[in-house]
Image (spheres, grey):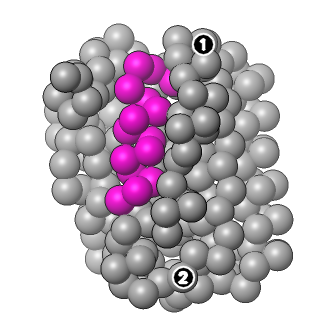
Amino acid sequence: MEHFLLSDTEKEELKQFIGAEAELPDMLNARERRVWVQEKLLAEYPGVLVSFTLNIPGPVKVLPYIPEAFALALKEILQALSDSGIPVLKRSLILDRTGPEAFLCVDADALDVKRLLVPLEDASKLGRLYDIDIIGRDGKKIARSDIGKPGRTCLLCGRPARECSRSRTHSVAELTSAIEKIFKENFAG
């Protein structure tokens, strides 16, 4: 498993993007690239795809402590898979101003992988920032509701996150402040 963790070189590569703004075209291109990578990996590897990013609102997707948070989350994901005997067939990373992304092809049932990894998103304040998508062999994303779990809640008010996001209930500054506080609680010396 060790060779799948984020290397010091990769962490340094990611740090170069701290504070860099991602424009709307950058984000749209990143979304298209993510879909392309997902489709390519699913076509090449007979398994399920774990697609991981961090939920960071606003134009700056790489805040201070993002490299540490991303590395820790990736380690937790890989440890959970390893502890459950789920082999990782392929690892792919994208480190960019639009935020880090990890793709893991695994040999397991999609619903089982979702059941295994959803608790990481719910276990802590830091985990609330994890966006772990599971894509089945058929290319369809497994929803939390598919395993009997409720939707995610807002980081600030506890209402359904989709509602707050859609209606822009909270400012980017409020959300970023809350995220930076979580990072400092977890990583500041």
Instruction: Report the magenta residues as a range.
Output: 62-76
**Which quadrant would residue 82 be assigned to in this image?**
bottom left
Mark 2 — residue? 87
Q: Give x and y (percent) for residue 135.
A: 60, 70
Residue 94: quadrant of the picture:
top right
Q: In this rendering, is residue 141 above or below 99?
A: below
Left or right: 185 as drawn, with respect to 96:
left
* Quadrant of the rendered image containing residue 49: bottom right
Query: Is 99 left, or right, of 23 in this rendering?
Result: left
Vertical arrangement, residue 84 with respect to residue 130, above or below: below
Disc ID at residue 174: none
**Residue at 21 percent of width and 34 percent of height:** 186
Mark nearer the viewer, 1 or 2: 2
Q: Total number of numbered labels?
A: 2
| Residue at 59%, 52% in the rendered image | 102
Tag 2: residue type?
A: Pro
Task: Write the residue at 63% across / 72% down.
Answer: 105
**Is 100 included in the stretch rendered in magenta?**
no
Instruction: Give the answer, above or below, for where 189 lies relative to 52.
Output: above
Q: Earlier in the sequence, mark 1 or mark 2?
A: 1
* Residue closer to the observer: 97 or 165: 97
**Which residue position is annotated with label 1?**
20
In depth, the one of 108 and 55 nearer the eye is 108
Say left or right for 7 vs 130: right
